[in-house]
Structure formats: structure tokens, C-alpha cells
């Protein structure tokens, strides 16, 4: 499929759903129209369930009557949650369909702030969802149902905390991007400076002994690196107990990539992972995949990965990107992408930052719709693995 034909492939957006510990638990598949045909085309192009495992897939239903046998054949019942508008709960035909879905192993979440236990019982829904930007359900609407209840379009951590108080335990929205602009603690800032120093040493091809110095100065950084190389992601049979071993086994290219992600890896005081970590991983992996689609060589893919992972540094550090870039000594094309979204990398970065890019944006980046969808699934798969290993 050529880029000029990208508008013929339906674009399905993915939005991660997290629990209270910022761990991804599900993904909502957003289809830009009421018909189920776009979803069928997207699922037919790649095995989304395999890429997104073990996350549940939430499918909003604007028209439940469109969910026929052809649609169900493409879905995995035990990992699919239908999000049904609350105003349809009284429809007898819909109730019959919902009973059939439940019997087959699908789950149903009733969507709307005006929903409650009575409406949920009509369609055998065990949980409610609602738009956090609008009216919220009351405590008595949520507590009688087992959940987990989902709120989406959450804008900041304060709103998330309020939603937890009324019984919500699944969350989606831009709250991570908004809230993360808070000032870092001195300890965080010191650790990140050491990571940046390590990246600088790698860039000038420093030897292993030089690389060990900043690692030994930061217990948290050391812990994350050793935890990483001893994880199932690398499959080393013997435990790795020294930094020189870790550096040697990872290799400089992989070490550089993981250090870029370790900027986001410090856990919060309450034990949560940093909400920006999986998002940075998605951007980095999708940038690399799209660069490969465009024919970029290994070095070009490394630069694309770097642009993706660094695109959230201003959010992470609470500083303008213009104040961060000069200290990193980046390649000119990476700097141009991060500062101005210019050049080929800038076009790709603008693409991956969009929830659902337009056909025009795809054409500008010379990417067809099917390639974009597959790159997005690959990126989510990698981000899921990263979140469990860092």
C-alpha cells in the first residue's frame, strides 16, 4: 500500500488504561466511525491481541447491532470488554445480545455517568465507565458493582485522586503529561544528570571503567540496570552481578537505548512506576519502526528511537526543551525534530504524538496506514515488556 492510499486503511487509535500504580491493564481501541468495518480491517491486518498481550482490549460500541458473527470471529472473548452506552441498556434486543456475549466470555462495561446498578443488571454489566470531563457518577452508583470502574479523559493527578475516592480503579487520559510537569526532587535531578552523563560517555566511546563510575554513584540507577539485564527480557542463564558484566553483555547500542529509558524509570515514593515510562517507550519504538519502514539504516533507526524517547524530557524535567537540548550534544536532525518538529524525524515525531493521525499527516511522513497500525502495535508490545522489566 502506498502512502497516497493511506486514507483507504482505517486508522484505529489505541489508548492505554492504567491502574492506580500506573501499570497498564487494558487498551481502548478507538474507531473513527460507528461501523465495525474499520476495526475488522485493522484486526485483519495484524494480530492485535498477540501484540497487546496480556492487556484487555476495550471496544466502545456506538452501534451494538453491528457486532455480528464476522466481528466476533476476530475477537478474543476472554480479553475483550465491550463498552456499551448506558442509554441502550433498556433495549430488549441489546439485552439479549449482551447475555449472549456474557455467555461466550465477553465482559461488558456500561458507559455513562447516569448509569447505575439497575441499568447494569439489564445488560449484565459488572462495571461502569464515564467521561471524567463531564458529570461523575455518585458513590452509590459504583459501589454495588464489582468493577473495575473506568474513568477516561482525566486531565491531572488531582482529578485522578478524586476519582479513586469514589471507587474508580482504571484510568485513562492525559493526566501523566499534565501532572509530570511538577518539579523533580533533588534526588531525581541528580540521578537523571548521571544518566545524561553516561549517555555522553557512550557518545564519545568511553571505556567500560569510565562507564562504571556514574553507575556506582547512584544505587537506584545501578539497581535498575542490574534488574534489567537479569530479567526475562534478555534470557541470560547465569545471574549478572557486576556492572562490567552488564555493560559487556548488553553491548553499547543496547546500553544506550536502555539508559535513555532509565531517565523515566525511577519509581515514585509510593511505589508507582513513572506514568511517562511506557509512553516514552511507545514513542521510541514506533519512531524506530517507522524509520525502518521508510528504509532507514541501523544508525538512522537509532536516531529515530532517540528522538522518540527524548520527546518527553521537557515534561519529565519540567523545563523547556530549548533549555535541555544544548547539554545533550544531539545530532542536528534529532535536535530539529525535538525543538521544531522539522525534517523527516520531525514529521515522524508529529505522527507518533497524535492519538489518531490524519491521512494528510501520514502522507507528509510518507507512511501508509497499514504500516502505521503495525508499527503502533509493535510499539505497544515493546512498551508493555519495558514496563515490566524496568
Image (tube, helix red, strand yellow):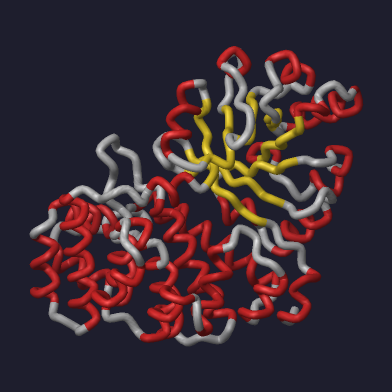
At horizontal 36% and vertical 54% (from top left) the residue drawn is 232
- Horizontal and vertical percent for residue 149? 58, 28
Q: Position of residue 312 (x, y in %)?
A: 40, 61
Which image quarter holds the N terminus? bottom right
Residue 300 image offset from top left, x and y in percent: 44, 84
Using the image, determine if residue 121 lies above or below residue 382.
above
Whether residue 301 is visible = yes
Name the residue nearer the viewer: 272 or 253: 272
Q: Quadrant of residue 353?
A: bottom right
Q: Nearer the viewer, residue 318 or 75?
A: 318
Indicate whether 309 appears above or below 78: below
- Total labels drawn: 0
Choose between 126 and 200: the one closer to the eye.
200
Q: Quadrant of residue 244?
A: bottom left
**Image position of 170 (left or right of 62):** left
Q: Residue at the spot x=67%, y=49% of the render?
A: 29
Q: Is residue 118 above or below residue 268?
A: above
> Is 192 on the left or on the right of 260, as rendered?
left
Residue 348 vertical position relative to residue 122 in the rendered view, above or below: below
State the residue at coordinates (27%, 81%). Answer: 329
Image point 72% across, 37% down: which residue? 82
Q: Could you tell whether 180 is left or right of 216 in the image? A: right
Relative image position of residue 358 (x, y in whole percent) = 69, 67
Q: Can residue 239 be seen in the rendering of this structure?
A: no
Amino acid at each position: 500500500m502506498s502512502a497516497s492510499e493511506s486514507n483507504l486503511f482505517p486508522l484505529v487509535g489505541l489508548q492505554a488504561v492504567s491502574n492506580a500504580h500506573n501499570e497498564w491493564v487494558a487498551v481502548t481501541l478507538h474507531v473513527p466511525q460507528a461501523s465495525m468495518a474499520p476495526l475488522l480491517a485493522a484486526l485483519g491486518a495484524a494480530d492485535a491481541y498477540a501484540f497487546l498481550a496480556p492487556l484487555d482490549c476495550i471496544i466502545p460500541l456506538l452501534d451494538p447491532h453491528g457486532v455480528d458473527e464476522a466481528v466476533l470471529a476476530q475477537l478474543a472473548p476472554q480479553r475483550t470488554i465491550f463498552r456499551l452506552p448506558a442509554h441502550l441498556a433498556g433495549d430488549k434486543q441489546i439485552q439479549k445480545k449482551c447475555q449472549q456475549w456474557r455467555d461466550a466470555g465477553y465482559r461488558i462495561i456500561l458507559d455513562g455517568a447516569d448509569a447505575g446498578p439497575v441499568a447494569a443488571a439489564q445488560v449484565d454489566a459488572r462495571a461502569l465507565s464515564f467521561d471524567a470531563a463531564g458529570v461523575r457518577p455518585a458513590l452509590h452508583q459504583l459501589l454495588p458493582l464489582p468493577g473495575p470502574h473506568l474513568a477516561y479523559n482525566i486531565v491531572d493527578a488531582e482529578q485522578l485522586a478524586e476519582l479513586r475516592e469514589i471507587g474508580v480503579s482504571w484510568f485513562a487520559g492525559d493526566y501523566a503529561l499534565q501532572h509530570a510537569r511538577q518539579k523533580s526532587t533533588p534526588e531525581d535531578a541528580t540521578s537523571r544528570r548521571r544518566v545524561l552523563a553516561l549517555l555522553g560517555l557512550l557518545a564519545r566511546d568511553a571505556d567500560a571503567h569510565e562507564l562504571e563510575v556514574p553507575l556506582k554513584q547512584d544505587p537506584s540507577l545501578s539497581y535498575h540496570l542490574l534488574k534489567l539485564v537479569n530479567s526475562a527480557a534478555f534470557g541470560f542463564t547465569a545471574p549478572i552481578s557486576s556492572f562490567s558484566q552488564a555493560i559487556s553483555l548488553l553491548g553499547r547500542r543496547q546500553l544506550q537505548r536502555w539508559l535513555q529509558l532509565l531517565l523515566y524509570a525511577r519509581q515514585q515514593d509510593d511505589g508507582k512506576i513513572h506514568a511517562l515510562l511506557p509512553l516514552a517507550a511507545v514513542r521510541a519504538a514506533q519512531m524506530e519502526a517507522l524509520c525502518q519502514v521508510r528504509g532507514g539504516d541501523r544508525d538512522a533507526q537509532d536516531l529515530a528511537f532517540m528522538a522518540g524517547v527524548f520527546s518527553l524530557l521537557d515534561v519529565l524535567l519540567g523545563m523547556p526543551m530549548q533549555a535541555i537540548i544544548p547539554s545533550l550534544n544531539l545530532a542536528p536532525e534529532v535536535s530539529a525534530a525535538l525543538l521544531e518538529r522539522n525534517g523527516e524525524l520531525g514529521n515522524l515525531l508529529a505522527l507518533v504524538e497524535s492519538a489518531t493521525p490524519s491521512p494528510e499527516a501520514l502522507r507528509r511522513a510518507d507512511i501508509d496506514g497499514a504500516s502505521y497500525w503495525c508499527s503502533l502495535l509493535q510499539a505497544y508490545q515493546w512498551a508493555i515488556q519495558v514496563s515490566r522489566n524496568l
